[in-house]
Image (cartoon, rainbow, N blue to C red):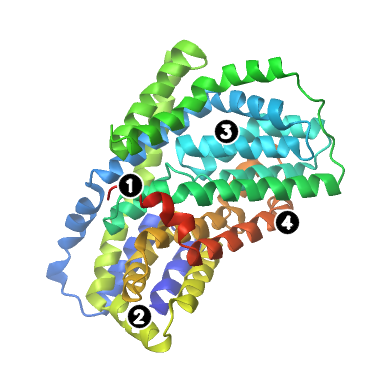
Amino acid sequence: MFLIFAGVLLVLLIGVTTAVTMGFVSLATFLMAGGAMDKLFLIPQRMYDQVSGITLMAIPFFLLMGNLMNVGGVSGSLFGFGRACLGHRWGGLSNAAIAACMVMAAMSGSAAACAAGIGMIAIGEMSKCGYDKSFSCATIAAGGALGPVIPPSITLILFAGLTNTSVGQLFAAGIIPGVLLGVGFMLWSSFVSKKNNYAKVDPVPWIERFDAFKKAFLALMTPVIVLGGMFGGFFTATEAAAVASFYVMILGFFVLKTIHLKDMPKIFWDTVEQTAKVMFIIATAAFFQYVLIYTRIPAQAIAFISDSFSSIVPVLLIIIVVLILMGCFMEGTAILLITVPIFVPLAKAFHYDIIQLGIVMCISLAIGVLTPPVGLNLYVMASITGDKVMKIAKHAVGYVLIMFLFAILTAFCSPVTLYLASFVKS
């Protein structure tokens, strides 16, 4: 198992794409373990089976919705509403950016989409009020990290597809941890803002707040459609994503009038390209999982850890630390696909709830968008502002520590995740 992970990391570091890396390492491991050449026909079969499930069909629709929102300028109305309500408080603009990211997260489920959408609007406003640019970038990058945690989350959809668990239960389980994380981020940004005496904007009259709410109302209805429709039993996760994408498209075309017919080819092509990248990784991961089962690595790992520990406590801590360390060097989707075949059977061996494990893994993986050298959201914010990645990463340390503490809280306090999930039918 150590050699496989080392091989994956080595091939990634020399610049090979994630999907090709997983396919290459899987094939090499299969042949070195004595796999018969005549069984290689299983590769395309396994790859196809992995991506043909109806659950994963939600991914392209959520990616489409994120692209529509970014082009349609939905993020502007969300930040404007947050600014009107919170701007007069210490750290008000940073809180408004985080709150807007939380709502964006409940629409797109993507960390990068949240950071990019809000970043292009909020950075300028925060700079005018004297906020340090690197701190502003780190705050929005952290707000974007809520994308994989707050439902609907592409990471949770993928976890559900890999483990045959309920998407609805996973979404319900992610609500409380996601909201608590957002509140924690707001408290930290307020503390830093007061410490550095970042300026507050003048209080906005209630009539202007109401006007800002009216502008943001239709955008705020998007998560209501997605989550309300799912939990109300009106549609599945895939159907909810399709309906919400259509709603955002209508909103952009006829209400906000920020999306034009000429924009659609690029929006659709970006969605196709992003979907192909994600699905190719998922497909090659199917063969990787087959190789792990063929070599009996998960069974041996479970036996070793079960003999070494009598409690789930050290095992969960190891899982969290391993995911955070891997997140420094690999993309979250690839890590999830590599570790699920080992961590899920391990959790079952200790009778640990798989829904709870999914949220713990999701939070731990989300930390990776804030940690160099990979740190996707750091690079997104650096590309928008021209700031240096390491300067942003330095200001993101506080947010990373908060996420680490929340990962531990989620791992050992089951009501945080399972309370709402218990009301959703599997």
Look at mark 2 in the image and give the residue it sits on.
301
Judge whether residue 17 can be spotted in this image. Answer: no
Q: For the residues carrying marks 2 and 1, which lies nearer the camera in this image?
A: 1
3D distance between C-alphas at marks 1 and 4: 40 Å
Query: Could you say which is closer to the camera, residue 337 or residue 330?
Result: 337
Residue designated by label 1: 424
Disc 4 from disc 2: Cα separation = 36 Å
Q: Quadrant of the N terminus?
A: bottom left
**310 over 120 or under it: above or below:** below
Q: Nearer the viewer, residue 162 or 258?
A: 162
> Nearer the observer, disc 4 or disc 2?
2
> Dot 2: what SS?
helix
250 over 41 or under it: above or below = above
Q: Which residue is mark 4?
A: 394
Q: Amino acid at mark 2?
A: Ala
Percent across and percent down for residue 358 are 40, 58
The residue carrying mark 3 is 117
Numbered badge on residue 362? none
The image shows residue 96 at horizontal and vertical percentages of 67, 34
Q: Secondary structure at mark 4?
A: helix
Marks 3, 1: nearer the viewer:
1
Q: Earlier in the sequence, mark 2 or mark 1?
A: 2
Q: Are marks 2 and 1 in contact (CB under 8 Å)?
A: no
Q: Secondary structure at mark 3?
A: helix
